[in-house]
Image (spheres, grey):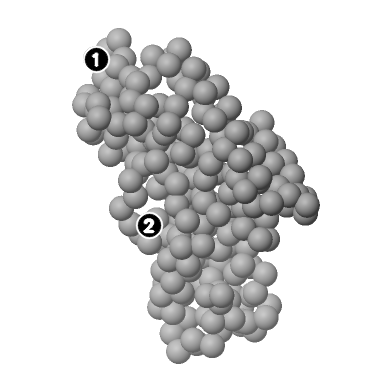
């Protein structure tokens, strides 16, 4: 587990434990921690030669925006937003940015695949699949990431920086932030459509394998 993951987990538990703390106080704590993390990361990126694209918000502000959302938890203690990083090198900044965004979307699809795989595997017995059907579902899960990636639409990076390399190429780093609930529902719908094709005429079993709610 990374230091960042530990930090987010601890903060989530801390905020859930604020039974005597007002929502306003909790938001202030998130803001304070977000600013601290943003300043620390901005220094690191700047030392590495990164800058923001012309016309963008300052690096510290972009990072503060992302950290505030990364710290947000719902009533069950789960992240409200999912994040995915992408990095790419190309001859132009535009090309590198496009490739970095696609890399981040694949990263995001991988996270969604993990969630959906766990749901399906937990429900296989409940869906009462026969051996052939279960084999078909297992085979599908090996390629589920690519199916899920198609459910992710256009996403504008919440954070985007670049640096010019000695060989004249440009390196771009991006971070995508998306609503966890929204993208998970979109991914579920895409996967359900694929499962319907594989398990023709067995809609009730698909509903048991992957309920939308």
Q: Would you say 49 lies left or right of 70 here?
A: left
Residue 90's spot in the image, x, y percent?
A: 27, 27
Left or right, 111 with respect to 103, comes to right
Residue name at image x 68 percent, y 78 percent: 125
Residue 109, position as x, y percentages in the image:
46, 53
In this orientation, does residue 37 appear? yes
Which quadrant of the rendered structure holds the C terminus? bottom right
- Spatial separation of the CA atoms under disc 1 and disc 2: 32 Å
The 10 Å Cα crowd at callout 1, few under 14, some 14 to 19, many 20 or more, is few
Give the residue furthest to the top. 166
Find disc 1 in the rendering and name its residue: 168
| Closest to the observer, 147 or 17 | 17
As drawn, 142 above or below 194: above
Secondary structure at numbered mark 1: loop
| Residue under the point 25% across and 26% down | 54
* Percent position of residue 209, x then y: 58, 76
| Viewer-proximal residue among 106 and 20 | 20
53 relative to 147 in the view: left or right: left
Residue drawn 72% across and 41% down?
A: 10
Residue beneath disc 2: 152
Q: Residues within 10 Å of mark 2 (few under 14, many from 20)?
A: some
Residue 74 pos. (x, y %)? 62, 58
């Amino acid at each position: 587990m990374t230091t960042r993951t530990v930090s987010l987990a601890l903060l989530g538990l801390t905020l859930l434990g604020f039974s005597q703390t007002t929502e306003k106080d909790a938001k202030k704590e998130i803001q304070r921690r977000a600013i601290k993390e943003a300043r620390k990361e901005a220094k690191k990126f700047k030392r590495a030669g990164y800058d923001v694209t012309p016309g963008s918000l300052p690096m510290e502000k972009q990072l503060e925006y992302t950290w505030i959302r990364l710290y947000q938890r719902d009533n069950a203690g789960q992240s409200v937003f999912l994040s995915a990083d992408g990095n790419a090198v190309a001859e132009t900044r535009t090309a590198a940015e496009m490739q970095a965004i696609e890399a981040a979307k694949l990263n995001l699809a991988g996270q969604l695949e993990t969630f959906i795989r766990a749901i399906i595997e937990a429900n296989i017995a409940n869906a009462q699949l026969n051996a052939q059907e279960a084999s078909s579902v297992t085979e599908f899960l090996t390629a589920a990431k690519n199916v899920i990636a198609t459910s992710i639409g256009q996403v504008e990076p919440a954070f985007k920086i670049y640096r010019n390399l000695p060989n004249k190429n440009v390196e771009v780093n991006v971070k995508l932030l998306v609503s966890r609930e929204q993208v998970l529902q979109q991914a579920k719908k895409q996967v359900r459509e694929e499962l319907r094709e594989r398990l023709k005429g067995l809609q009730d079993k698909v509903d048991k394998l992957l309920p939308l709610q």
